[in-house]
Amino acid sequence: MRTFDYTQEVPVVEGQPSAKSLDEVVSSPLDTKPGKIWKILITVTTLMLLVGAGALVWTFYKGIGVWGNNQPVGWGFDIVNFVFWVGIGHAGTLISAILFLLRQRWRTGIARFAEAMTIFAVMCAGIFPAIHTGRAWLDGYLFPYPNANHIWVNFTSPLLWDVFAVSTYFTVSLVFWYIGLIPDFATLRDRTDNKIKKTVYSIFSLGWRHSTRHWQHYEKAYMILAGFATPLVLSVHTIVSFDFAVSVIPGWHTTIFPPYFVAGAVFSGFAMVQNVLIFVRQAFNLKHIITINHLEKMNQVIIVVGTMVGYAYAMEFFTAWYSGNQFETFTFINRALGPYAWAYWTMVTCNVILPQLFWSKKIRTTIWTMFIIGIIVNIGMWFERFVIIVTSLSRDFLPSSWGMYTPTIYDIGILIFSFGLFFTNVLLFVRTLPSVSIAEVKASVDGAQPSHRGGHH
Amino acid sequence: MNTKKIYSIGGLFDTPDGITKAAEDAVKEGYTKFDVNTPYPVHGMERAMNLKPSLLGFITLFVGLSGAAFAFLFMYWVSVMDYPLIIGGKPFFSWPAFVPVTFEVTVLSAAVGTVAVMIALVFKFPNNSHPLHDTNYMKNVSSDKFGLNVVYIDPLFDESKVKDFLSRAGANNIEVIYEPERKPLRVFDPKFIGLLVMLVLLTAGVTYFTLNKLLYMPPFTWMAVQDKLSSQSQNTMFADGYGMRNPVEGTVARGFTPYEFKGQPDSVVKNLSNPLPFTKENIDKGKLRFDTYCSPCHGYYGKGDSRLNGQFPNPPTLHSDKVKNWSDGNIYHVIVNGQNVMPSYAKQISKDDRWAIIHYIRVLQRSLNAKDSDLETKKQ
C-alpha cells in the first residue's frame, strides 16, 4: 500500500521543466491550428449561443411576459441563473486571491484559468438582472447619475447594492486578471515572429520589460489587489444573499444566508473550475502543470464547503422549528414534502450525499469520477437556488395567493444561452491567451529562486 | 564605426544565484542606474539592488479613503438632502444601509486607482518604444535568462569599464544596446487627422441615432401599444364602442357621504355653520378650489365676470347683499344642489373643500367691501 507523507509539500510543477519548455507548452495552443475536438466543441457552444440568442431576442421583442414568472413567483429562472453564475465566479477569486494570500503555492498552475472563469461567469450572471428589468435598454438608470428626470437610485435597497457589488466584482476581477497577464504578454511578444500577433501583444504588454524596478511595484500591486479581492469576493455573495435575507418572505429572512451563500458559491465554483481544468489539461498537454495533486486539493475544498452547505441545510430546518414561527416551519416542511420536493431532494442528493464520496482518495484522484461528481455538484447547486427562490415565493403567507411556477422554453433558452456564452468564452480563451501564468509557474519551479534565500517563502 | 547612441550595456546570466550576486556587485561598484530584468520576480532582488520599498500602498490608501468618503457623502446628500424619500418608514439617514455601497466603492476605487497609478507613473505607459525592446537581451530575459544592464545615464558609465565589470561578474553574453532611431511623430499626418474626424463623426452619429431615433422605433414601443382599454379611443370590447365606462348605478365613491339635506327647505340648511376653522391653510385651499371650480363662471373675484364668453349665462355677483347676508349653510346648499342653471358640484368637490371655498368667498366679500374701520385696525 502506498503511504502519503503529508509533511512534505508535493512539487507544484511536476518534473522540473525548463523555463523555455514552459513557454513552449503554454503558448502552443496559441500558435498551433485548433484540433478537431476544439472545433466540435466550439460548434456546439456557438449553437447554444445562437439558440439562446433567439430566446433573448424574442424576450426583448415581446417582453418578459413570455417567461414563466408569474404572480406570486416573480423571481424565476432569471434570478436562479443569476445567483448560480455569480456563485461560479467565486472560485476564481478564491483561488487567485485568498489562496495567494495564504501562500498556497499549488494555486499557481490554475489561478489564471480560474480568474478567467470568474470573469466569464460574472458576464453570464450580469445578463440576468439586466434582462429581468424588462426593458434592458434602460438599464443605465441602475447607476446613480444626474439625469433629466432628477431622480436617484434607492441606496437602501439590496438590489442596488447588488448593482454595485457585481459591477465592482467584475471590474476588479478583470483588472486583477489583466495585471497578471502583462508579463506573459511580454513573453509572448518576444517569442513571436508573426507581425499581427506582435502588434497585439505589444499593445497589451504595455511595454513590459521584466525590469526589477517594475516587478517590485507589480508585486506590491498584486498583493494589494489580492488583499482587496478577498473581502470583495466574500461581500459579493453576501450582498446577493441580502437580496433575499433583507426581505420578509419565509425561508429567505434568515441571518444564516450570507455565510451559507458564500460557501455554496465556492462549492459550485470549485466544481466548475475542476471540470473545465480536467478538459484543458487533457486537451492541451498541461498535465505536468495542472497536476492530479491540484485537482485533488480542489476536491478537498469541495468536500469541505459541501459539508458546510449541508450543515446550512440542516440548520435552516432547525431554526425553522426552533423559531416556532408557523410560516417558517411550514415553508421548510413544504420544501421537503411539498410540490417541489423533487427539486429539494435532487439538491440534497447532489450537494450533500454524493460529494461525500470524495472522502475516498481513489475517487478524488481518479479523473472520471471527480469529473462526474463535479457535474453533479453543479446540478445540485443550480437546484439549491431554484429551491430557495421558487418554493419560498410559490407558497408564502396567504394560501389564497399561492401559485406554481413552470418555466417556459424561453427561460430554458436563455439558460442555454448563458452556458453557450460561458463555454464559448472559455474555448476562445484557451486558444488566445496563456491559460497558465507563465511567469508565476516559472517562479515556482524548484530551483527558480536564489538558493541562499532558502528557496520559496 | 557605429554612430548610434548607446543606451545601455547588458549581460545575461543563467541562474538566479548568478544574477543576485551580480546585482550585489553592481551596487558595490557604485552603479546606481542599472536594471535587472528577470522573467519572473526573483526573491530578494530589490534588496540586492538596494531599491527603496514600493510606495504604492500609500496611493491605495489615499484613493481608497477618498472613494469611501465620496461614496458615503454622496449617498447622504442624495438620500437626505437632494431627494429624500421615505422608504419602509426608515430615517433618511440610515447609515447601516450605506455600508455595502461604501465598501464596494472603496474597493473599486482603491483597486483601479492603484493599478492606474502603477501603469501611468511607474510603467510610464505607453512605453512600447523602449530601447530594450526587440534586442537579443530582451528576448532572453523574457524567457529563461536573467539580465543586468547598466544605463548610459549612470555617472560611472563607461563602455569598456561596464563590459569589463559584466564579464567579471560572470555574464556570458554581453550586448551593447543602442537608442532606436526616433522617427518624427506621425500624428499630424492629414490622413490620420482625417481618420480621427471621421471616427468622431461616426461615433457621434451612431450615438445620436441610437439614443434619439432607434430607441423610439419599433419594437421599442415604450409600452405605448398594449392590449388595454384606453379611455379616449374606440374599443371593440363593449357593444357601445366606448372605452370609458360609467360606474355601476348606485356606486358610491370612497369618502363620499350623500347630501344629508337633499330636497329640504333653505330654512333647515341656513342653520348649518362652517365646521372648518378660519385659518390661513383653509383659506388657501379654498382659493385653490374656487379658482379651479367656480372662477370660470363667477370670475376670480366672484364678480360674475365669466370667462366663458357668453356660452353659459353669466351668474350674478357674489358680492350682492343677498349672498353677503346668506349664512354659510346657504352657499353650501347651492354648491351641493346647484341653483337653477348652475349645476351641482357635489361630485367634484369634497365636503371639506366646499367649506373651504365658502371661507374664501367670505374673504373675497370682505376684501372688496372693506370698511374704514378695517383700515383703522391695520393702522394700530
Image: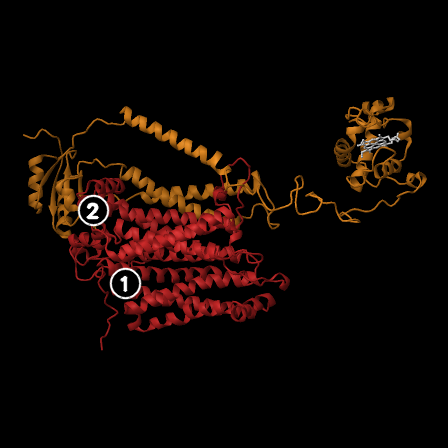
**Left or right, residue A291 beside residue A171:** left
Do the CB atoms of the residues marked 1 and 2 lie less than 8 Å apart? no
Left or right: B52 in relation to B278: left
Say above or below: A391 vs A431: below
Q: Position of residue A81 (x, y in %)?
A: 45, 56
Q: Colour of chain A?
A: red
**Residue A151 - label:** none
Please state which of residues B27 and B73 is positioned toward the viewer in this rendering: B73
A254 and A410: which one is in front? Answer: A410
Please identify the residue farthest to the left as the structure is shown: B1
Where is residue A445 shown, x and y percent of the image? 19, 57
Is A413 placed left or right of B324 in the picture?
left
Q: Residue at x 66, y 47 (%)?
A: B237
Residue flagged by tag 1: what amino acid is it? His
> To which residue does mark 2 refer?
A187
Q: Is residue B191 above or below residue A249?
A: above
Task: Tell me if I can see residue B43 in this picture.
Answer: no
Q: Which residue is more in the foreground, A75 or A439?
A: A75
Task: Please say if B318 is above or below B238.
Answer: above
- Which of the 4 quarters of the picture holds residue B358? top right
Q: Nearer the viewer, residue A230 or B28?
A: A230
Instruction: Give residue A285's position: percent from left, percent from top.
Output: 21, 59
Question: Residue at position x 40%, y 43% from top?
Answer: B109
Q: How is the image coloured?
A: by chain
Callout 1 secondary element: helix
Which residue lies under the disc numbered 1?
A: A294
Q: Is residue B104 left or right of residue B352?
A: left
Residue type beneath disc 2: Thr
Quick one: SS at disc 2?
helix
Q: Chain of mark 1?
A: A
**Colour orange belongs to chain:** B
